[in-house]
Amino acid sequence: MVNLATTDTICAIATPPGAGAIAVIRISGSMTFEICAALFTPAKRGLDIRQAPGHTLHFGVIGDRTAILDEVLISLFRAPQSYTGEDVIEISCHGSVYVQQKMLELLVDKGLRLARPGEFTLRAFLNGKFDLSQAEAVADLIASHSGASHSLAIGQMRGGFSKRIKVLRDKLIGFTALIELELDFSEEQVEFADRTALLTLLAEIREELSALTSSFSFGNVIRNGIPVAIIGKPNVGKSTLLNAILNEEKAIVSDIPGTTRDAIEDTIVIGGYSFRFIDTAGLRAAEDKIETIGIERTWEKIQEATVILYVFDATRESFEEVMEAVNEIRELTEEKGKHMVMIGNKTDKLKKLPKGFTGFVEYETIFVSGKRKENIHLIAESLLNTLSDAELSNSTLVSNTRHYEALQQALAAVDAVIGGFQAGVFADLLTTDILIALHHLGEITGEITNDEILGTIFSRFCIGK
């Protein structure tokens, strides 16, 4: 369980580990200015950083009584106008590993404590700088690997998702107030709200919760990368195709069927979206135990994938053979949210397209040469086309599993209220389910939380953030 005490002053290296041009040491807490003043000698005579205003920069040296450690630039931030809401100083020093470690030693010797993972952001949350969902978005922003995941994180960090949750909570609180007011005047049989209007309000709340919950499937893949499984029979050129898409020799290529025994993954960014490609073992009757495991994993990857690229050898497989293979996996590919594209490979060995495929409209079909890297760009265009306009235009996408689970529980509680309302259940019983919905929405923003939840969330942050 996390220790929520914030009376001590903490410090940590805020830049990535290792040597670099510069490093930043972050300090936060009530003793920040006092301790730094004991170690910092400003270049400007007469300057006392304990009296200097916030949001100012000062050049000087840091060291102890025996020697100067480094020339530094310090940034001053006074409470509450800082990231954590406390007094904060950031020391920009040279990026020598020795200098960084020695700097921390000097600060700890003066009474500072090394920060735990995510402790600066935890303090920002506890001091009301932002809510819990915004704090989690900070970690997502740091980990963003594409334009889409960055936009998703920055939108949540700036409060877009929190605002929608607040509107939902306000509506539920207003509904509860009317119900409880009627309970206070139950003996007089006073009705303070039109039942039809209340049902309409509940329907609106349910629709909003349902939309947010449904957005998780897309938001989650944007955050983690859209999984694309490359499948097909052995020796159709799946590994060659993967190498062509990635533009590097990631997978071993061989004329020997069954070369790929396990799934091989790598990620590239196309049009601002991260796609996680998975090269799988060829689908066939396994000849040994290892190959059996590889094929089992292929079926697992098909189930996990959002997009499936079914690769076939255009020089050998007929239209009927391809359709027979596709029919075997049709149930998996027709699952909501999945998209399959047919990839006819090895066109460098063809003089014309094989019969049957020219009029094939059930699935999008692209003919390529993985060996010569011909028409690979068409695959990239197809992948971008799989992202629906409705999903891309959704300004608020749920990408966090914790938020998704809380929204599901809130939705179930609202459904219970609607069912009870329609069945004529007493109002005092309805308020119980409303309070459950409010509780789960409050968990998202941190209005309702506990030390264990906070400890789990912030332990995933890097030290110094």
Image (tube, rainbow, N blue to C red):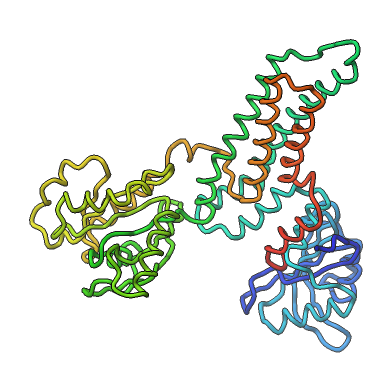
How many marks can you see? 0
Give the x, y percent position of residue 128: 81, 48
Left or right position of 18 against 92? left
Give the x, y percent position of residue 433: 75, 33
Residue shown at the point (68%, 63%) measured from the top left: 460
Give the x, y percent position of residue 382: 33, 48
Residue 391 or residue 193, whichever sits in front: 193
Residue shown at the point (42%, 54%) measured from the top left: 303
Q: Residue furthest bottom?
A: 66
From where the camera sits, is residue 55 visible?
no
Quarter of the picture containing the N terminus is: bottom right
Left or right position of 318 against 71? left
Residue 316 or residue 269, whichever sits in front: 316
Give the x, y percent position of residue 445: 73, 45
Left or right position of 315 against 289? left
Left or right position of 84 against 237? right
Query: Image quarter for residue 270?
Result: bottom left
Residue shown at the point (59%, 44%) measured from the top left: 398
Residue 209's place in the image compared with 13, above or below, is above
Residue 322 or residue 123, whichever sits in front: 322
Query: Image quarter for residue 173?
Result: top right
Residue 189's place in the image compared with 441, above or below, is above
From where the camera sits, is residue 157 visible?
yes
Q: Residue furthest left?
A: 351
Residue 77 or residue 308, whichever sits in front: 308
Residue 398's place in the image compared with 321, above or below, is above
Quarter of the picture containing the C terminus is: bottom right
